[in-house]
């Protein structure tokens, strides 16, 4: 309504920049002909316009374009970032004016995109935008390079009027090449991409989109090289950045040739994808552990699985209607994830945030260990806080016999009064082996409920559960096997092995269909598997250990057997996979243990530390000092090394560290492990003469830039919207440009009514670290940066090595 009032027209505000761009391009195209055209003059006169010659027609059109430009400046064209700036720049180029510095100043420092900082503040350090994979993120990807193209064109027309010294390039930040690379790096099996938020990856059920062009098949037939990059964007990105990886992506797309991607860890946004070694990979597993804004789902720790050119575990994607996301497509209950219910704390559209604790890559086994917490927004205090639910998730991609693969998925929930584990599975029927569940009335939310009835629910977080009906219920056995068979392509299965579950856990299955209309009118029908448990107190942990095997033929797993911990950390668990061909993989996980903590398992294995894997008689460790198993013993030297950053070059993405040894390219380090705890990939290592190491990290540590609006003894406010949602900037650093001072950010928030709707960002500083007192005296207009680390911060290194 505000945009409608500002522009005084009934044109949808989001469309206005597109309309402006099309009209400006059309005018620029036909301008040479308007000087001789008489038909336009006669038509305009017939409409009562007082035009006499071609110059009057040109003036009329340019006045119309100027009106559209003013509409943008009046915020009457509110659209997805950075569409307003793109529309304005196209108009400026079409008008070919050298006197529009006022417009340019507005675009750079006052408009919604704030071009002076857009390339930094609108993208995570790994290059991902702040919205949703699919169409929404692509607006940002493409928009960044479109803006640079338009700015360069305007400078070419009027180099003195719009110099780069006053209106700098958007290509200077180290994250820019990654903006063009990340859409490629989130692809899965060369047929789709990892989907979070309101998008439509191939294989999802977004807007009734078919998964395959073949009748009776869920095979994805179209190649996927990236998530929504236009051909022009790739050409511009390759030219503007000169980055060899971007050029490689461009050539691959041009030649329709897949590239080997390997493991993807985008720790800024919070996406990790594991892949088998082929090009393209035959199987890929992805998990989302971060948080974004606007077109967001409550999909914290959602795990997706694609294999054999088919989707097996997917997101629902784009909503059926904008009336449905909160209770269905965007609801936590429709994702392959975990949840904790807290009385008096509704999710309010927020899920939480996690961090990658450690990785382990061995022969045919790739493991991610991730922890996360629920976050909530305090409307009265206008602060983010953690209400007390924590999660832990171990996800592993295991290569079995031949072309087979399996997904290991171990989950832990602590805190709150109810713990849930949900999985829609493969679209189709679900069956258990050796036991049956009992049909029950109502919905998953309760036996008295009616599908889609949201009134009177025991908790607001039950909304998604209240849309699942045709329930079958029972007590979960300690271990069992079942699975899904595709309803579209019979013979395609997703086998499920439950290897462990906590005592007194309920097991349900339920129908999950699109919520608008009757179930039989839905374009998809899932049979969700659901685990629910009520812990005896807030400290009790609920464990659900699962193994999934996707297959289009015979199973390759002979068994998946849980190995209980008999001594040591209570949430510890072991798992043995044995294939029909004789391959044995055992995973031992003690998530709360330090590197010296001992956990003994029922098969006689003792793990000293957090994570160990035995693959056909060879042991590997991460965060562990030793493993004794199968009558053998292995030690892992330097299992947990704590070093310190002594120098850094933020532009070059290098840090000089002391106290670390044997770091190699491809390893990972965690900076400020007791704080924000971001995980960085190591791209290169240089040994310095004083025993220190210079590490080249995969992404920049610059999180945002903005000028100070105000500073006092209580708080500091910056004049830009930096993403603070669910604690994104808590425990990072605030550093004024140029003087080396810094302070630790204790809390950060955008003080709008929803926690993210403000054009400003407010910080509360931690007095015990850095120079918080100096920050409180910063003058308005002083430029400051939010950074992930400074010299003196800790770096944690847990090498992944084979045991000796």
Image (tube, rainbow, N blue to C red):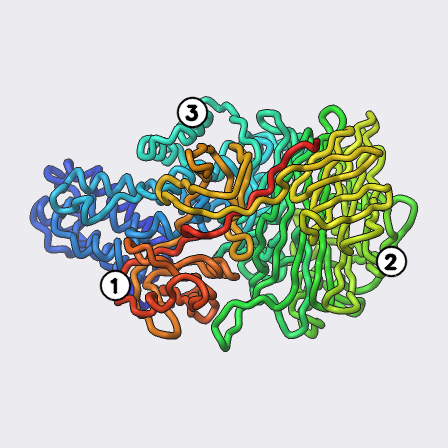
Marks 2 and 3 sit apart, C-alpha to C-alpha, by: 55 Å
Q: Where residue 30 appears, x then y in whole percent?
A: 20, 38
Above or below 5: residue 69: above
Q: Residues within 10 Å of mark 1 (few under 14, many from 20)?
A: few
Q: Quadrant of the C terminus?
A: top right
Q: Residues within 10 Å of mark 2 (few under 14, many from 20)?
A: some
Residue 251 occupies quadrant: top left
Q: Earlier in the sequence, mark 1 or mark 3?
A: 3
User: Are the residues tagged 1 and 3 within 8 Å (C-beta)?
Assistant: no
Marks 2 and 1 sit apart, C-alpha to C-alpha, by: 62 Å
Q: In the figure, is residue 406 to the left or right of 141?
A: right
Q: Earlier in the sequence, mark 2 or mark 3?
A: 3
Task: Say which element carries label 3.
Answer: helix
Q: Earlier in the sequence, mark 2 or mark 1?
A: 2
Task: Say which element carries label 2.
Answer: strand
- Farthest right residue? 434
Q: Which residue is mark 1?
A: 781
Q: Which residue is mark 3?
A: 251
Q: In the figure, is residue 50 to the left or right of 617?
A: left
Q: In the figure, is residue 609 to the left or right of 376?
A: right
User: Mark number for residue 475?
Assistant: 2
Q: Residue at x 83, y 56 (%)?
A: 472
Q: Nearer the viewer, mark 2 or mark 1?
A: 1
Q: Where residue 796 appears, x then y in whole percent?
A: 55, 47
Task: Say which element carries label 1.
Answer: loop
Q: Where residue 175 appears, x then y in whole percent?
A: 39, 42
Q: Is residue 360 visible?
A: yes
């Amino acid at each position: 309504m505000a945009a409608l009032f500002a522009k005084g027209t009934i044109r949808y505000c989001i469309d206005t920049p597109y309309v402006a761009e099309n009209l400006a391009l059309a005018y620029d195209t036909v301008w040479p002909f308007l000087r001789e055209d008489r038909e336009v003059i006669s038509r305009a006169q017939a409409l009562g316009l007082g035009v006499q010659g071609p110059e009057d027609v040109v003036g009329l059109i340019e006045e119309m374009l100027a009106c559209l430009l003013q509409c943008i400046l009046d915020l009457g064209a509110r659209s997805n970032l950075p569409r307003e700036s793109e529309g304005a720049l196209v108009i400026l180029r079409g008008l070919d004016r050298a006197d529009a510095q006022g417009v340019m100043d507005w675009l750079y420092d006052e408009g919604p995109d704030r071009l002076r900082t857009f390339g930094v503040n609108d993208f995570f350090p790994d290059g991902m935008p702040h919205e949703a994979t699919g169409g929404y993120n692509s607006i940002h990807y493409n928009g960044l390079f479109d803006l640079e193209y338009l700015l360069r064109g305007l400078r070419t027309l009027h180099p003195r009027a719009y110099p780069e010294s006053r209106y700098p390039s958007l290509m200077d930040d180290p994250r820019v090449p990654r903006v063009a690379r990340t859409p490629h790096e989130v692809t899965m099996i060369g047929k789709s991409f990892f989907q979070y938020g309101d998008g439509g990856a191939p294989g999802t059920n977004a807007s009734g989109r078919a998964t395959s062009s073949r009748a009776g098949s869920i095979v994805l037939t179209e190649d996927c090289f990236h998530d929504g990059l236009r051909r022009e964007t790739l050409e511009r990105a390759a030219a503007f950045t000169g980055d060899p990886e971007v050029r490689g992506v461009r050539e691959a797309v041009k030649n329709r040739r897949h590239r080997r991607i390997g493991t993807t860890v985008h720790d800024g946004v919070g996406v990790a994808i594991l892949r088998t070694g082929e090009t393209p990979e035959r199987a890929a597993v992805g998990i989302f552990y971060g948080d974004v804004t606007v077109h967001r789902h409550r999909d914290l720790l959602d795990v997706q699985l694609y294999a054999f050119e088919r989707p097996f575990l997917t997101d629902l994607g784009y909503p059926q209607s904008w009336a449905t996301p909160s209770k269905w497509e965007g609801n936590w209950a429709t994702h392959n994830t975990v949840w904790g219910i807290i009385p008096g704390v509704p999710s309010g559209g927020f899920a939480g945030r996690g961090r990658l604790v450690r990785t382990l890559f061995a022969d045919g086994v790739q493991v991610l260990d991730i922890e996360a917490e629920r976050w909530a927004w305090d409307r009265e205090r206008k602060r983010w806080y953690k209400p007390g639910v924590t999660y832990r998730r171990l996800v592993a991609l295991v290569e079995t016999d031949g072309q087979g693969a399996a997904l290991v998925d171990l989950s832990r929930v602590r805190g709150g009064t109810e713990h849930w584990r949900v999985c829609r599975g493969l679209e189709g029927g679900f069956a258990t082996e050796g036991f049956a569940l009992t049909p029950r009335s109502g919905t998953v939310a309760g036996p008295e409920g009616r599908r889609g009835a949201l009134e009177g629910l025991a908790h607001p977080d039950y909304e998604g559960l209240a849309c699942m009906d045709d329930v079958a219920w029972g007590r979960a056995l300690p271990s069992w096997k079942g699975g899904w068979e595709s309803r579209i392509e019979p013979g395609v299965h997703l086998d499920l092995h439950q290897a462990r579950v906590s005592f007194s856990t309920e097991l349900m299955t339920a129908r999950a269909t699109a919520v608008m209309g009757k179930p039989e009118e839905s374009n998809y029908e899932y049979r969700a598997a659901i685990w629910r448990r009520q812990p005896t107190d807030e400290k009790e942990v609920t464990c659900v250990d699962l193994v999934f095997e996707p297959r289009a033929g015979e199973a390759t797993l002979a068994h998946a057997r849980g190995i209980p911990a008999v001594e040591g950390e209570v949430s510890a668990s072991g798992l043995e996979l044995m294939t029909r061909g004789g391959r044995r993989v055992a995973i031992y996980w003690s998530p709360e243990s330090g590197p010296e903590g001992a956990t003994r398992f029922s098969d006689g294995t003792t793990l000293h530390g957090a994570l160990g894997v035995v693959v056909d008689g060879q042991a590997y460790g991460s965060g562990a000092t030793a493993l004794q198993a199968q009558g053998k013993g292995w030690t892992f030297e330097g299992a947990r090394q704590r070093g310190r950053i002594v120098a850094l070059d933020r532009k070059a993405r290098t840090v000089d560290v002391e106290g670390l040894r044997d770091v190699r390219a491809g390893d990972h380090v965690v900076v400020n492990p007791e704080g924000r705890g971001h995980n960085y990939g190591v791209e290169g290592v240089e040994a310095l003469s004083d025993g220190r190491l210079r590490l080249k990290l995969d992404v920049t540590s610059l999180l945002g830039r903005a000028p100070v609006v105000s500073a006092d003894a209580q708080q500091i406010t910056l004049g830009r919207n930096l993403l603070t949602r669910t604690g994104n900037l808590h425990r990072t650093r605030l550093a004024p440009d140029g003087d080396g001072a810094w302070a630790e950010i204790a809390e950060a928030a955008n003080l709008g009514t929803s926690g993210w709707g403000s054009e400003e960002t407010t910080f509360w500083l931690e007095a015990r670290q850095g120079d918080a007192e100096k920050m409180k005296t910063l003058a308005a207009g002083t430029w400051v940066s939010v950074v992930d680390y400074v010299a003196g911060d800790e770096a944690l290194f847990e090498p992944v090595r084979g045991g000796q």
